[in-house]
Amino acid sequence: MSSFFGDIEIKKEQVNAIEAQTIVEGSSIWAPGVYPVAIDRAYTRKTDSGAKMFTVFFKDAANNNIMFSTCVQSGNDKGNKSTYVSKEGKEKLLPGIEEVKRLFDAIKVEDPAGRLAKVDHFGTNIEVMAYPDLTGKQLMIGLRTEDNEYNGEVRVQNLFEAFLTSDGKNAKGEDLLESLKTKIEKAPHKKSKQKSTPSAPAADTGVAATQG
């Protein structure tokens, strides 16, 4: 049977070495804040470049949806790897894998089983590795907004700041809910370094942390 970490060729000891979620000060489009949500659906898809993207759709109590997507394996030109070499010459897991691990910690899932499926991905029917056991799992997400430049235009999108358990704790059992709220209140928006003028938020996308 396939599993998430097995599918992207990550060893258990590498996964276990990922530290628990922390809140560090300073560091659809939903308003910045902390939200209780449930997972609507989750899957890993392959991009045209060969990169693997882990994609999750969350929904709140009113059935509003927001998407989180992050790269967990590089594209063909980078060898389809789940690691990269740092400036210090050390091999490290892609940042997206650490994010996904903390999401799994928040819903108390170690390594979800996957199965091939067909899904409608923004109007295109594609084959993915789906994780149906994640559907319905509840957690807290912390959101900020950020400017994202694409084709010379800056758009506002959501930035996922943290994934915590439904009662606001990390994998170590530390209550980070108030720290997360404080951080977001102090810096709700991350501005672009570009000089372009931000446009209105893209409707119903909520895409953050995307790579590929």
Image (spheres, rainbow, N blue to C red):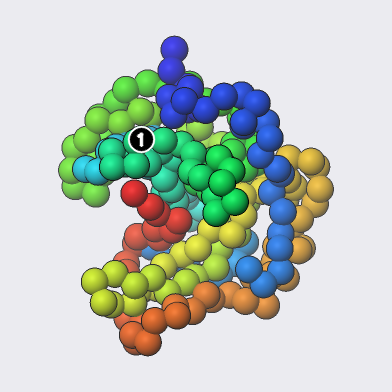
**Most extreme residue toward the top, as rendered?**
1
Neighbourhood count class around disc 1 (C-alpha, 10 Å): few under 14, some 14–19, many 20 upward: some
Residue under label 1: 80
Does dot 1 land on a helix, a strand or a loop? Answer: loop
The answer to which of 212 and 133 lies nearer the viewer is: 212
* 102 in relation to 117, above or below: below
The answer to which of 18 and 203 lies nearer the viewer is: 18
Q: Is residue 158 left or right of residue 119?
A: right
Q: Amino acid at mark 1?
A: Asn
**Most extreme residue toward the front, as rendered?**
89
The answer to which of 130 and 15 lies nearer the viewer is: 15
In percent of the image, x 24 and y 49: which residue is there? 122
* 186 in relation to 28, above or below: below
Q: Is residue 165 left or right of residue 135?
A: right
Estimate the x, y position of residue 144 in percent, counting from the top left: 55, 68
**Most extreme residue toward the left, as rendered?**
124
In percent of the image, x 67 and y 77: which residue is there? 186
In percent of the image, x 56 and y 63: which residue is there? 143
* 135 in relation to 58, above or below: above
Estimate the x, y position of residue 46 in percent, counting from the top left: 29, 37
Estimate the x, y position of residue 23 in percent, counting from the top left: 71, 59
Q: Is residue 113 left or right of residue 168?
A: left
Residue 108 in which image quadrant: top right
Question: How many numbered callouts?
Answer: 1
Estimate the x, y position of residue 188 in percent, counting from the top left: 58, 75
- Quarter of the image where the N terminus is located: top left
Residue 151 shows up from this direction: yes
In percent of the image, x 36 and y 35: which residue is there? 80
Residue 61 shows up from this direction: no
